[in-house]
Image (cartoon, helix red, strand yellow):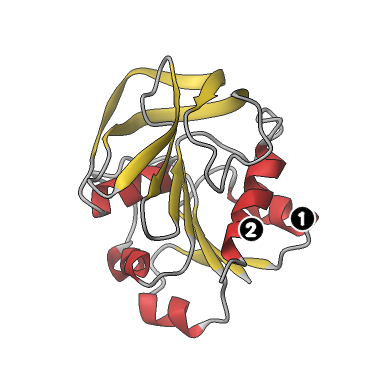
Amino acid sequence: MILILNNGGQYVHRIWRSLKYLGEESEIIPNDTPVKEILARNLVGLILSGGPCSVYGGVGKLGSSMDVLESGIPVLGICLGHQLIALKMGGKVQKGESAEYAQVEVRILERDDLFQGLSEKIQVWESHKDEVSEIPEEFIALAESDICRFEAVKHNKLPIYGVQFHPEVEHTPDGPLILKNYVNACSKD
């Protein structure tokens, strides 16, 4: 099972539905769920959803739930989730030069797990004001765009991924494959 940590994003149920279409069991849980409860579940992965707030305020009671990053469970951060991972692991997040609510072309820099089977350039849906401005030391950039330097990142040792865009929505045509690639990464030994 993949748990989806709900950060209040408008697309959180689309993440659940996208995983259902892929045949992957998932459940949406509150973003203040203690890490002890998360780890007690029979999970193979955790997705941190997007949300309307900034990482610097109003996100809710994330507290210890972010400690799951150190557990070895594959984690995918989407939009706000991506920003939360970066901040928790030592990166920086700031207001983007231009808020984006549109389809954007992203260039894949590293195929890695998430982008297997995709073209060098893909169209994605952006819906954010803040963005990761500096990635943590242990991370590598997987994708970029003209408006955002770190569209996708990955920890260089742990199965932790982040994407600034929304793979769960129809306006990201390759989104189902990106999510399938994440599901496949969850089943790696």
Residue 60, image quadrant: bottom left
Q: Locate the N terminus and report the quarter of the image it occupies.
A: bottom right
Q: Do the CB atoms of the residues marked 2 and 1 lie less than 8 Å apart?
A: yes
Residue 146: x and y in percent read 43, 14
Which residue is outermost to the bottom?
40
Residue at the (46%, 69%) spot, across then down: 73
Kindly identify which residue carries mark 2: 183
| Residue 1 shown left or right of residue 32 in the figure | right
Q: Amino acid at mark 2?
A: Val
The C terminus, quarter of image = bottom right
Marks 2 and 1 sit apart, C-alpha to C-alpha, by 9 Å
Give the left or right position of residue 145, taking residue 149 as reference: right
Residue at (41%, 70%) from the top-left corner?
72
Q: Position of residue 19 (x, y in %)?
A: 70, 56
- 182 to 28, vertically: above or below: above
Q: Which residue is mark 1?
A: 22
The x, y position of residue 127, in whole percent, is: 49, 29
Labelled disc at residue 124: none
Nearest to the observer: residue 157 or residue 35:
157
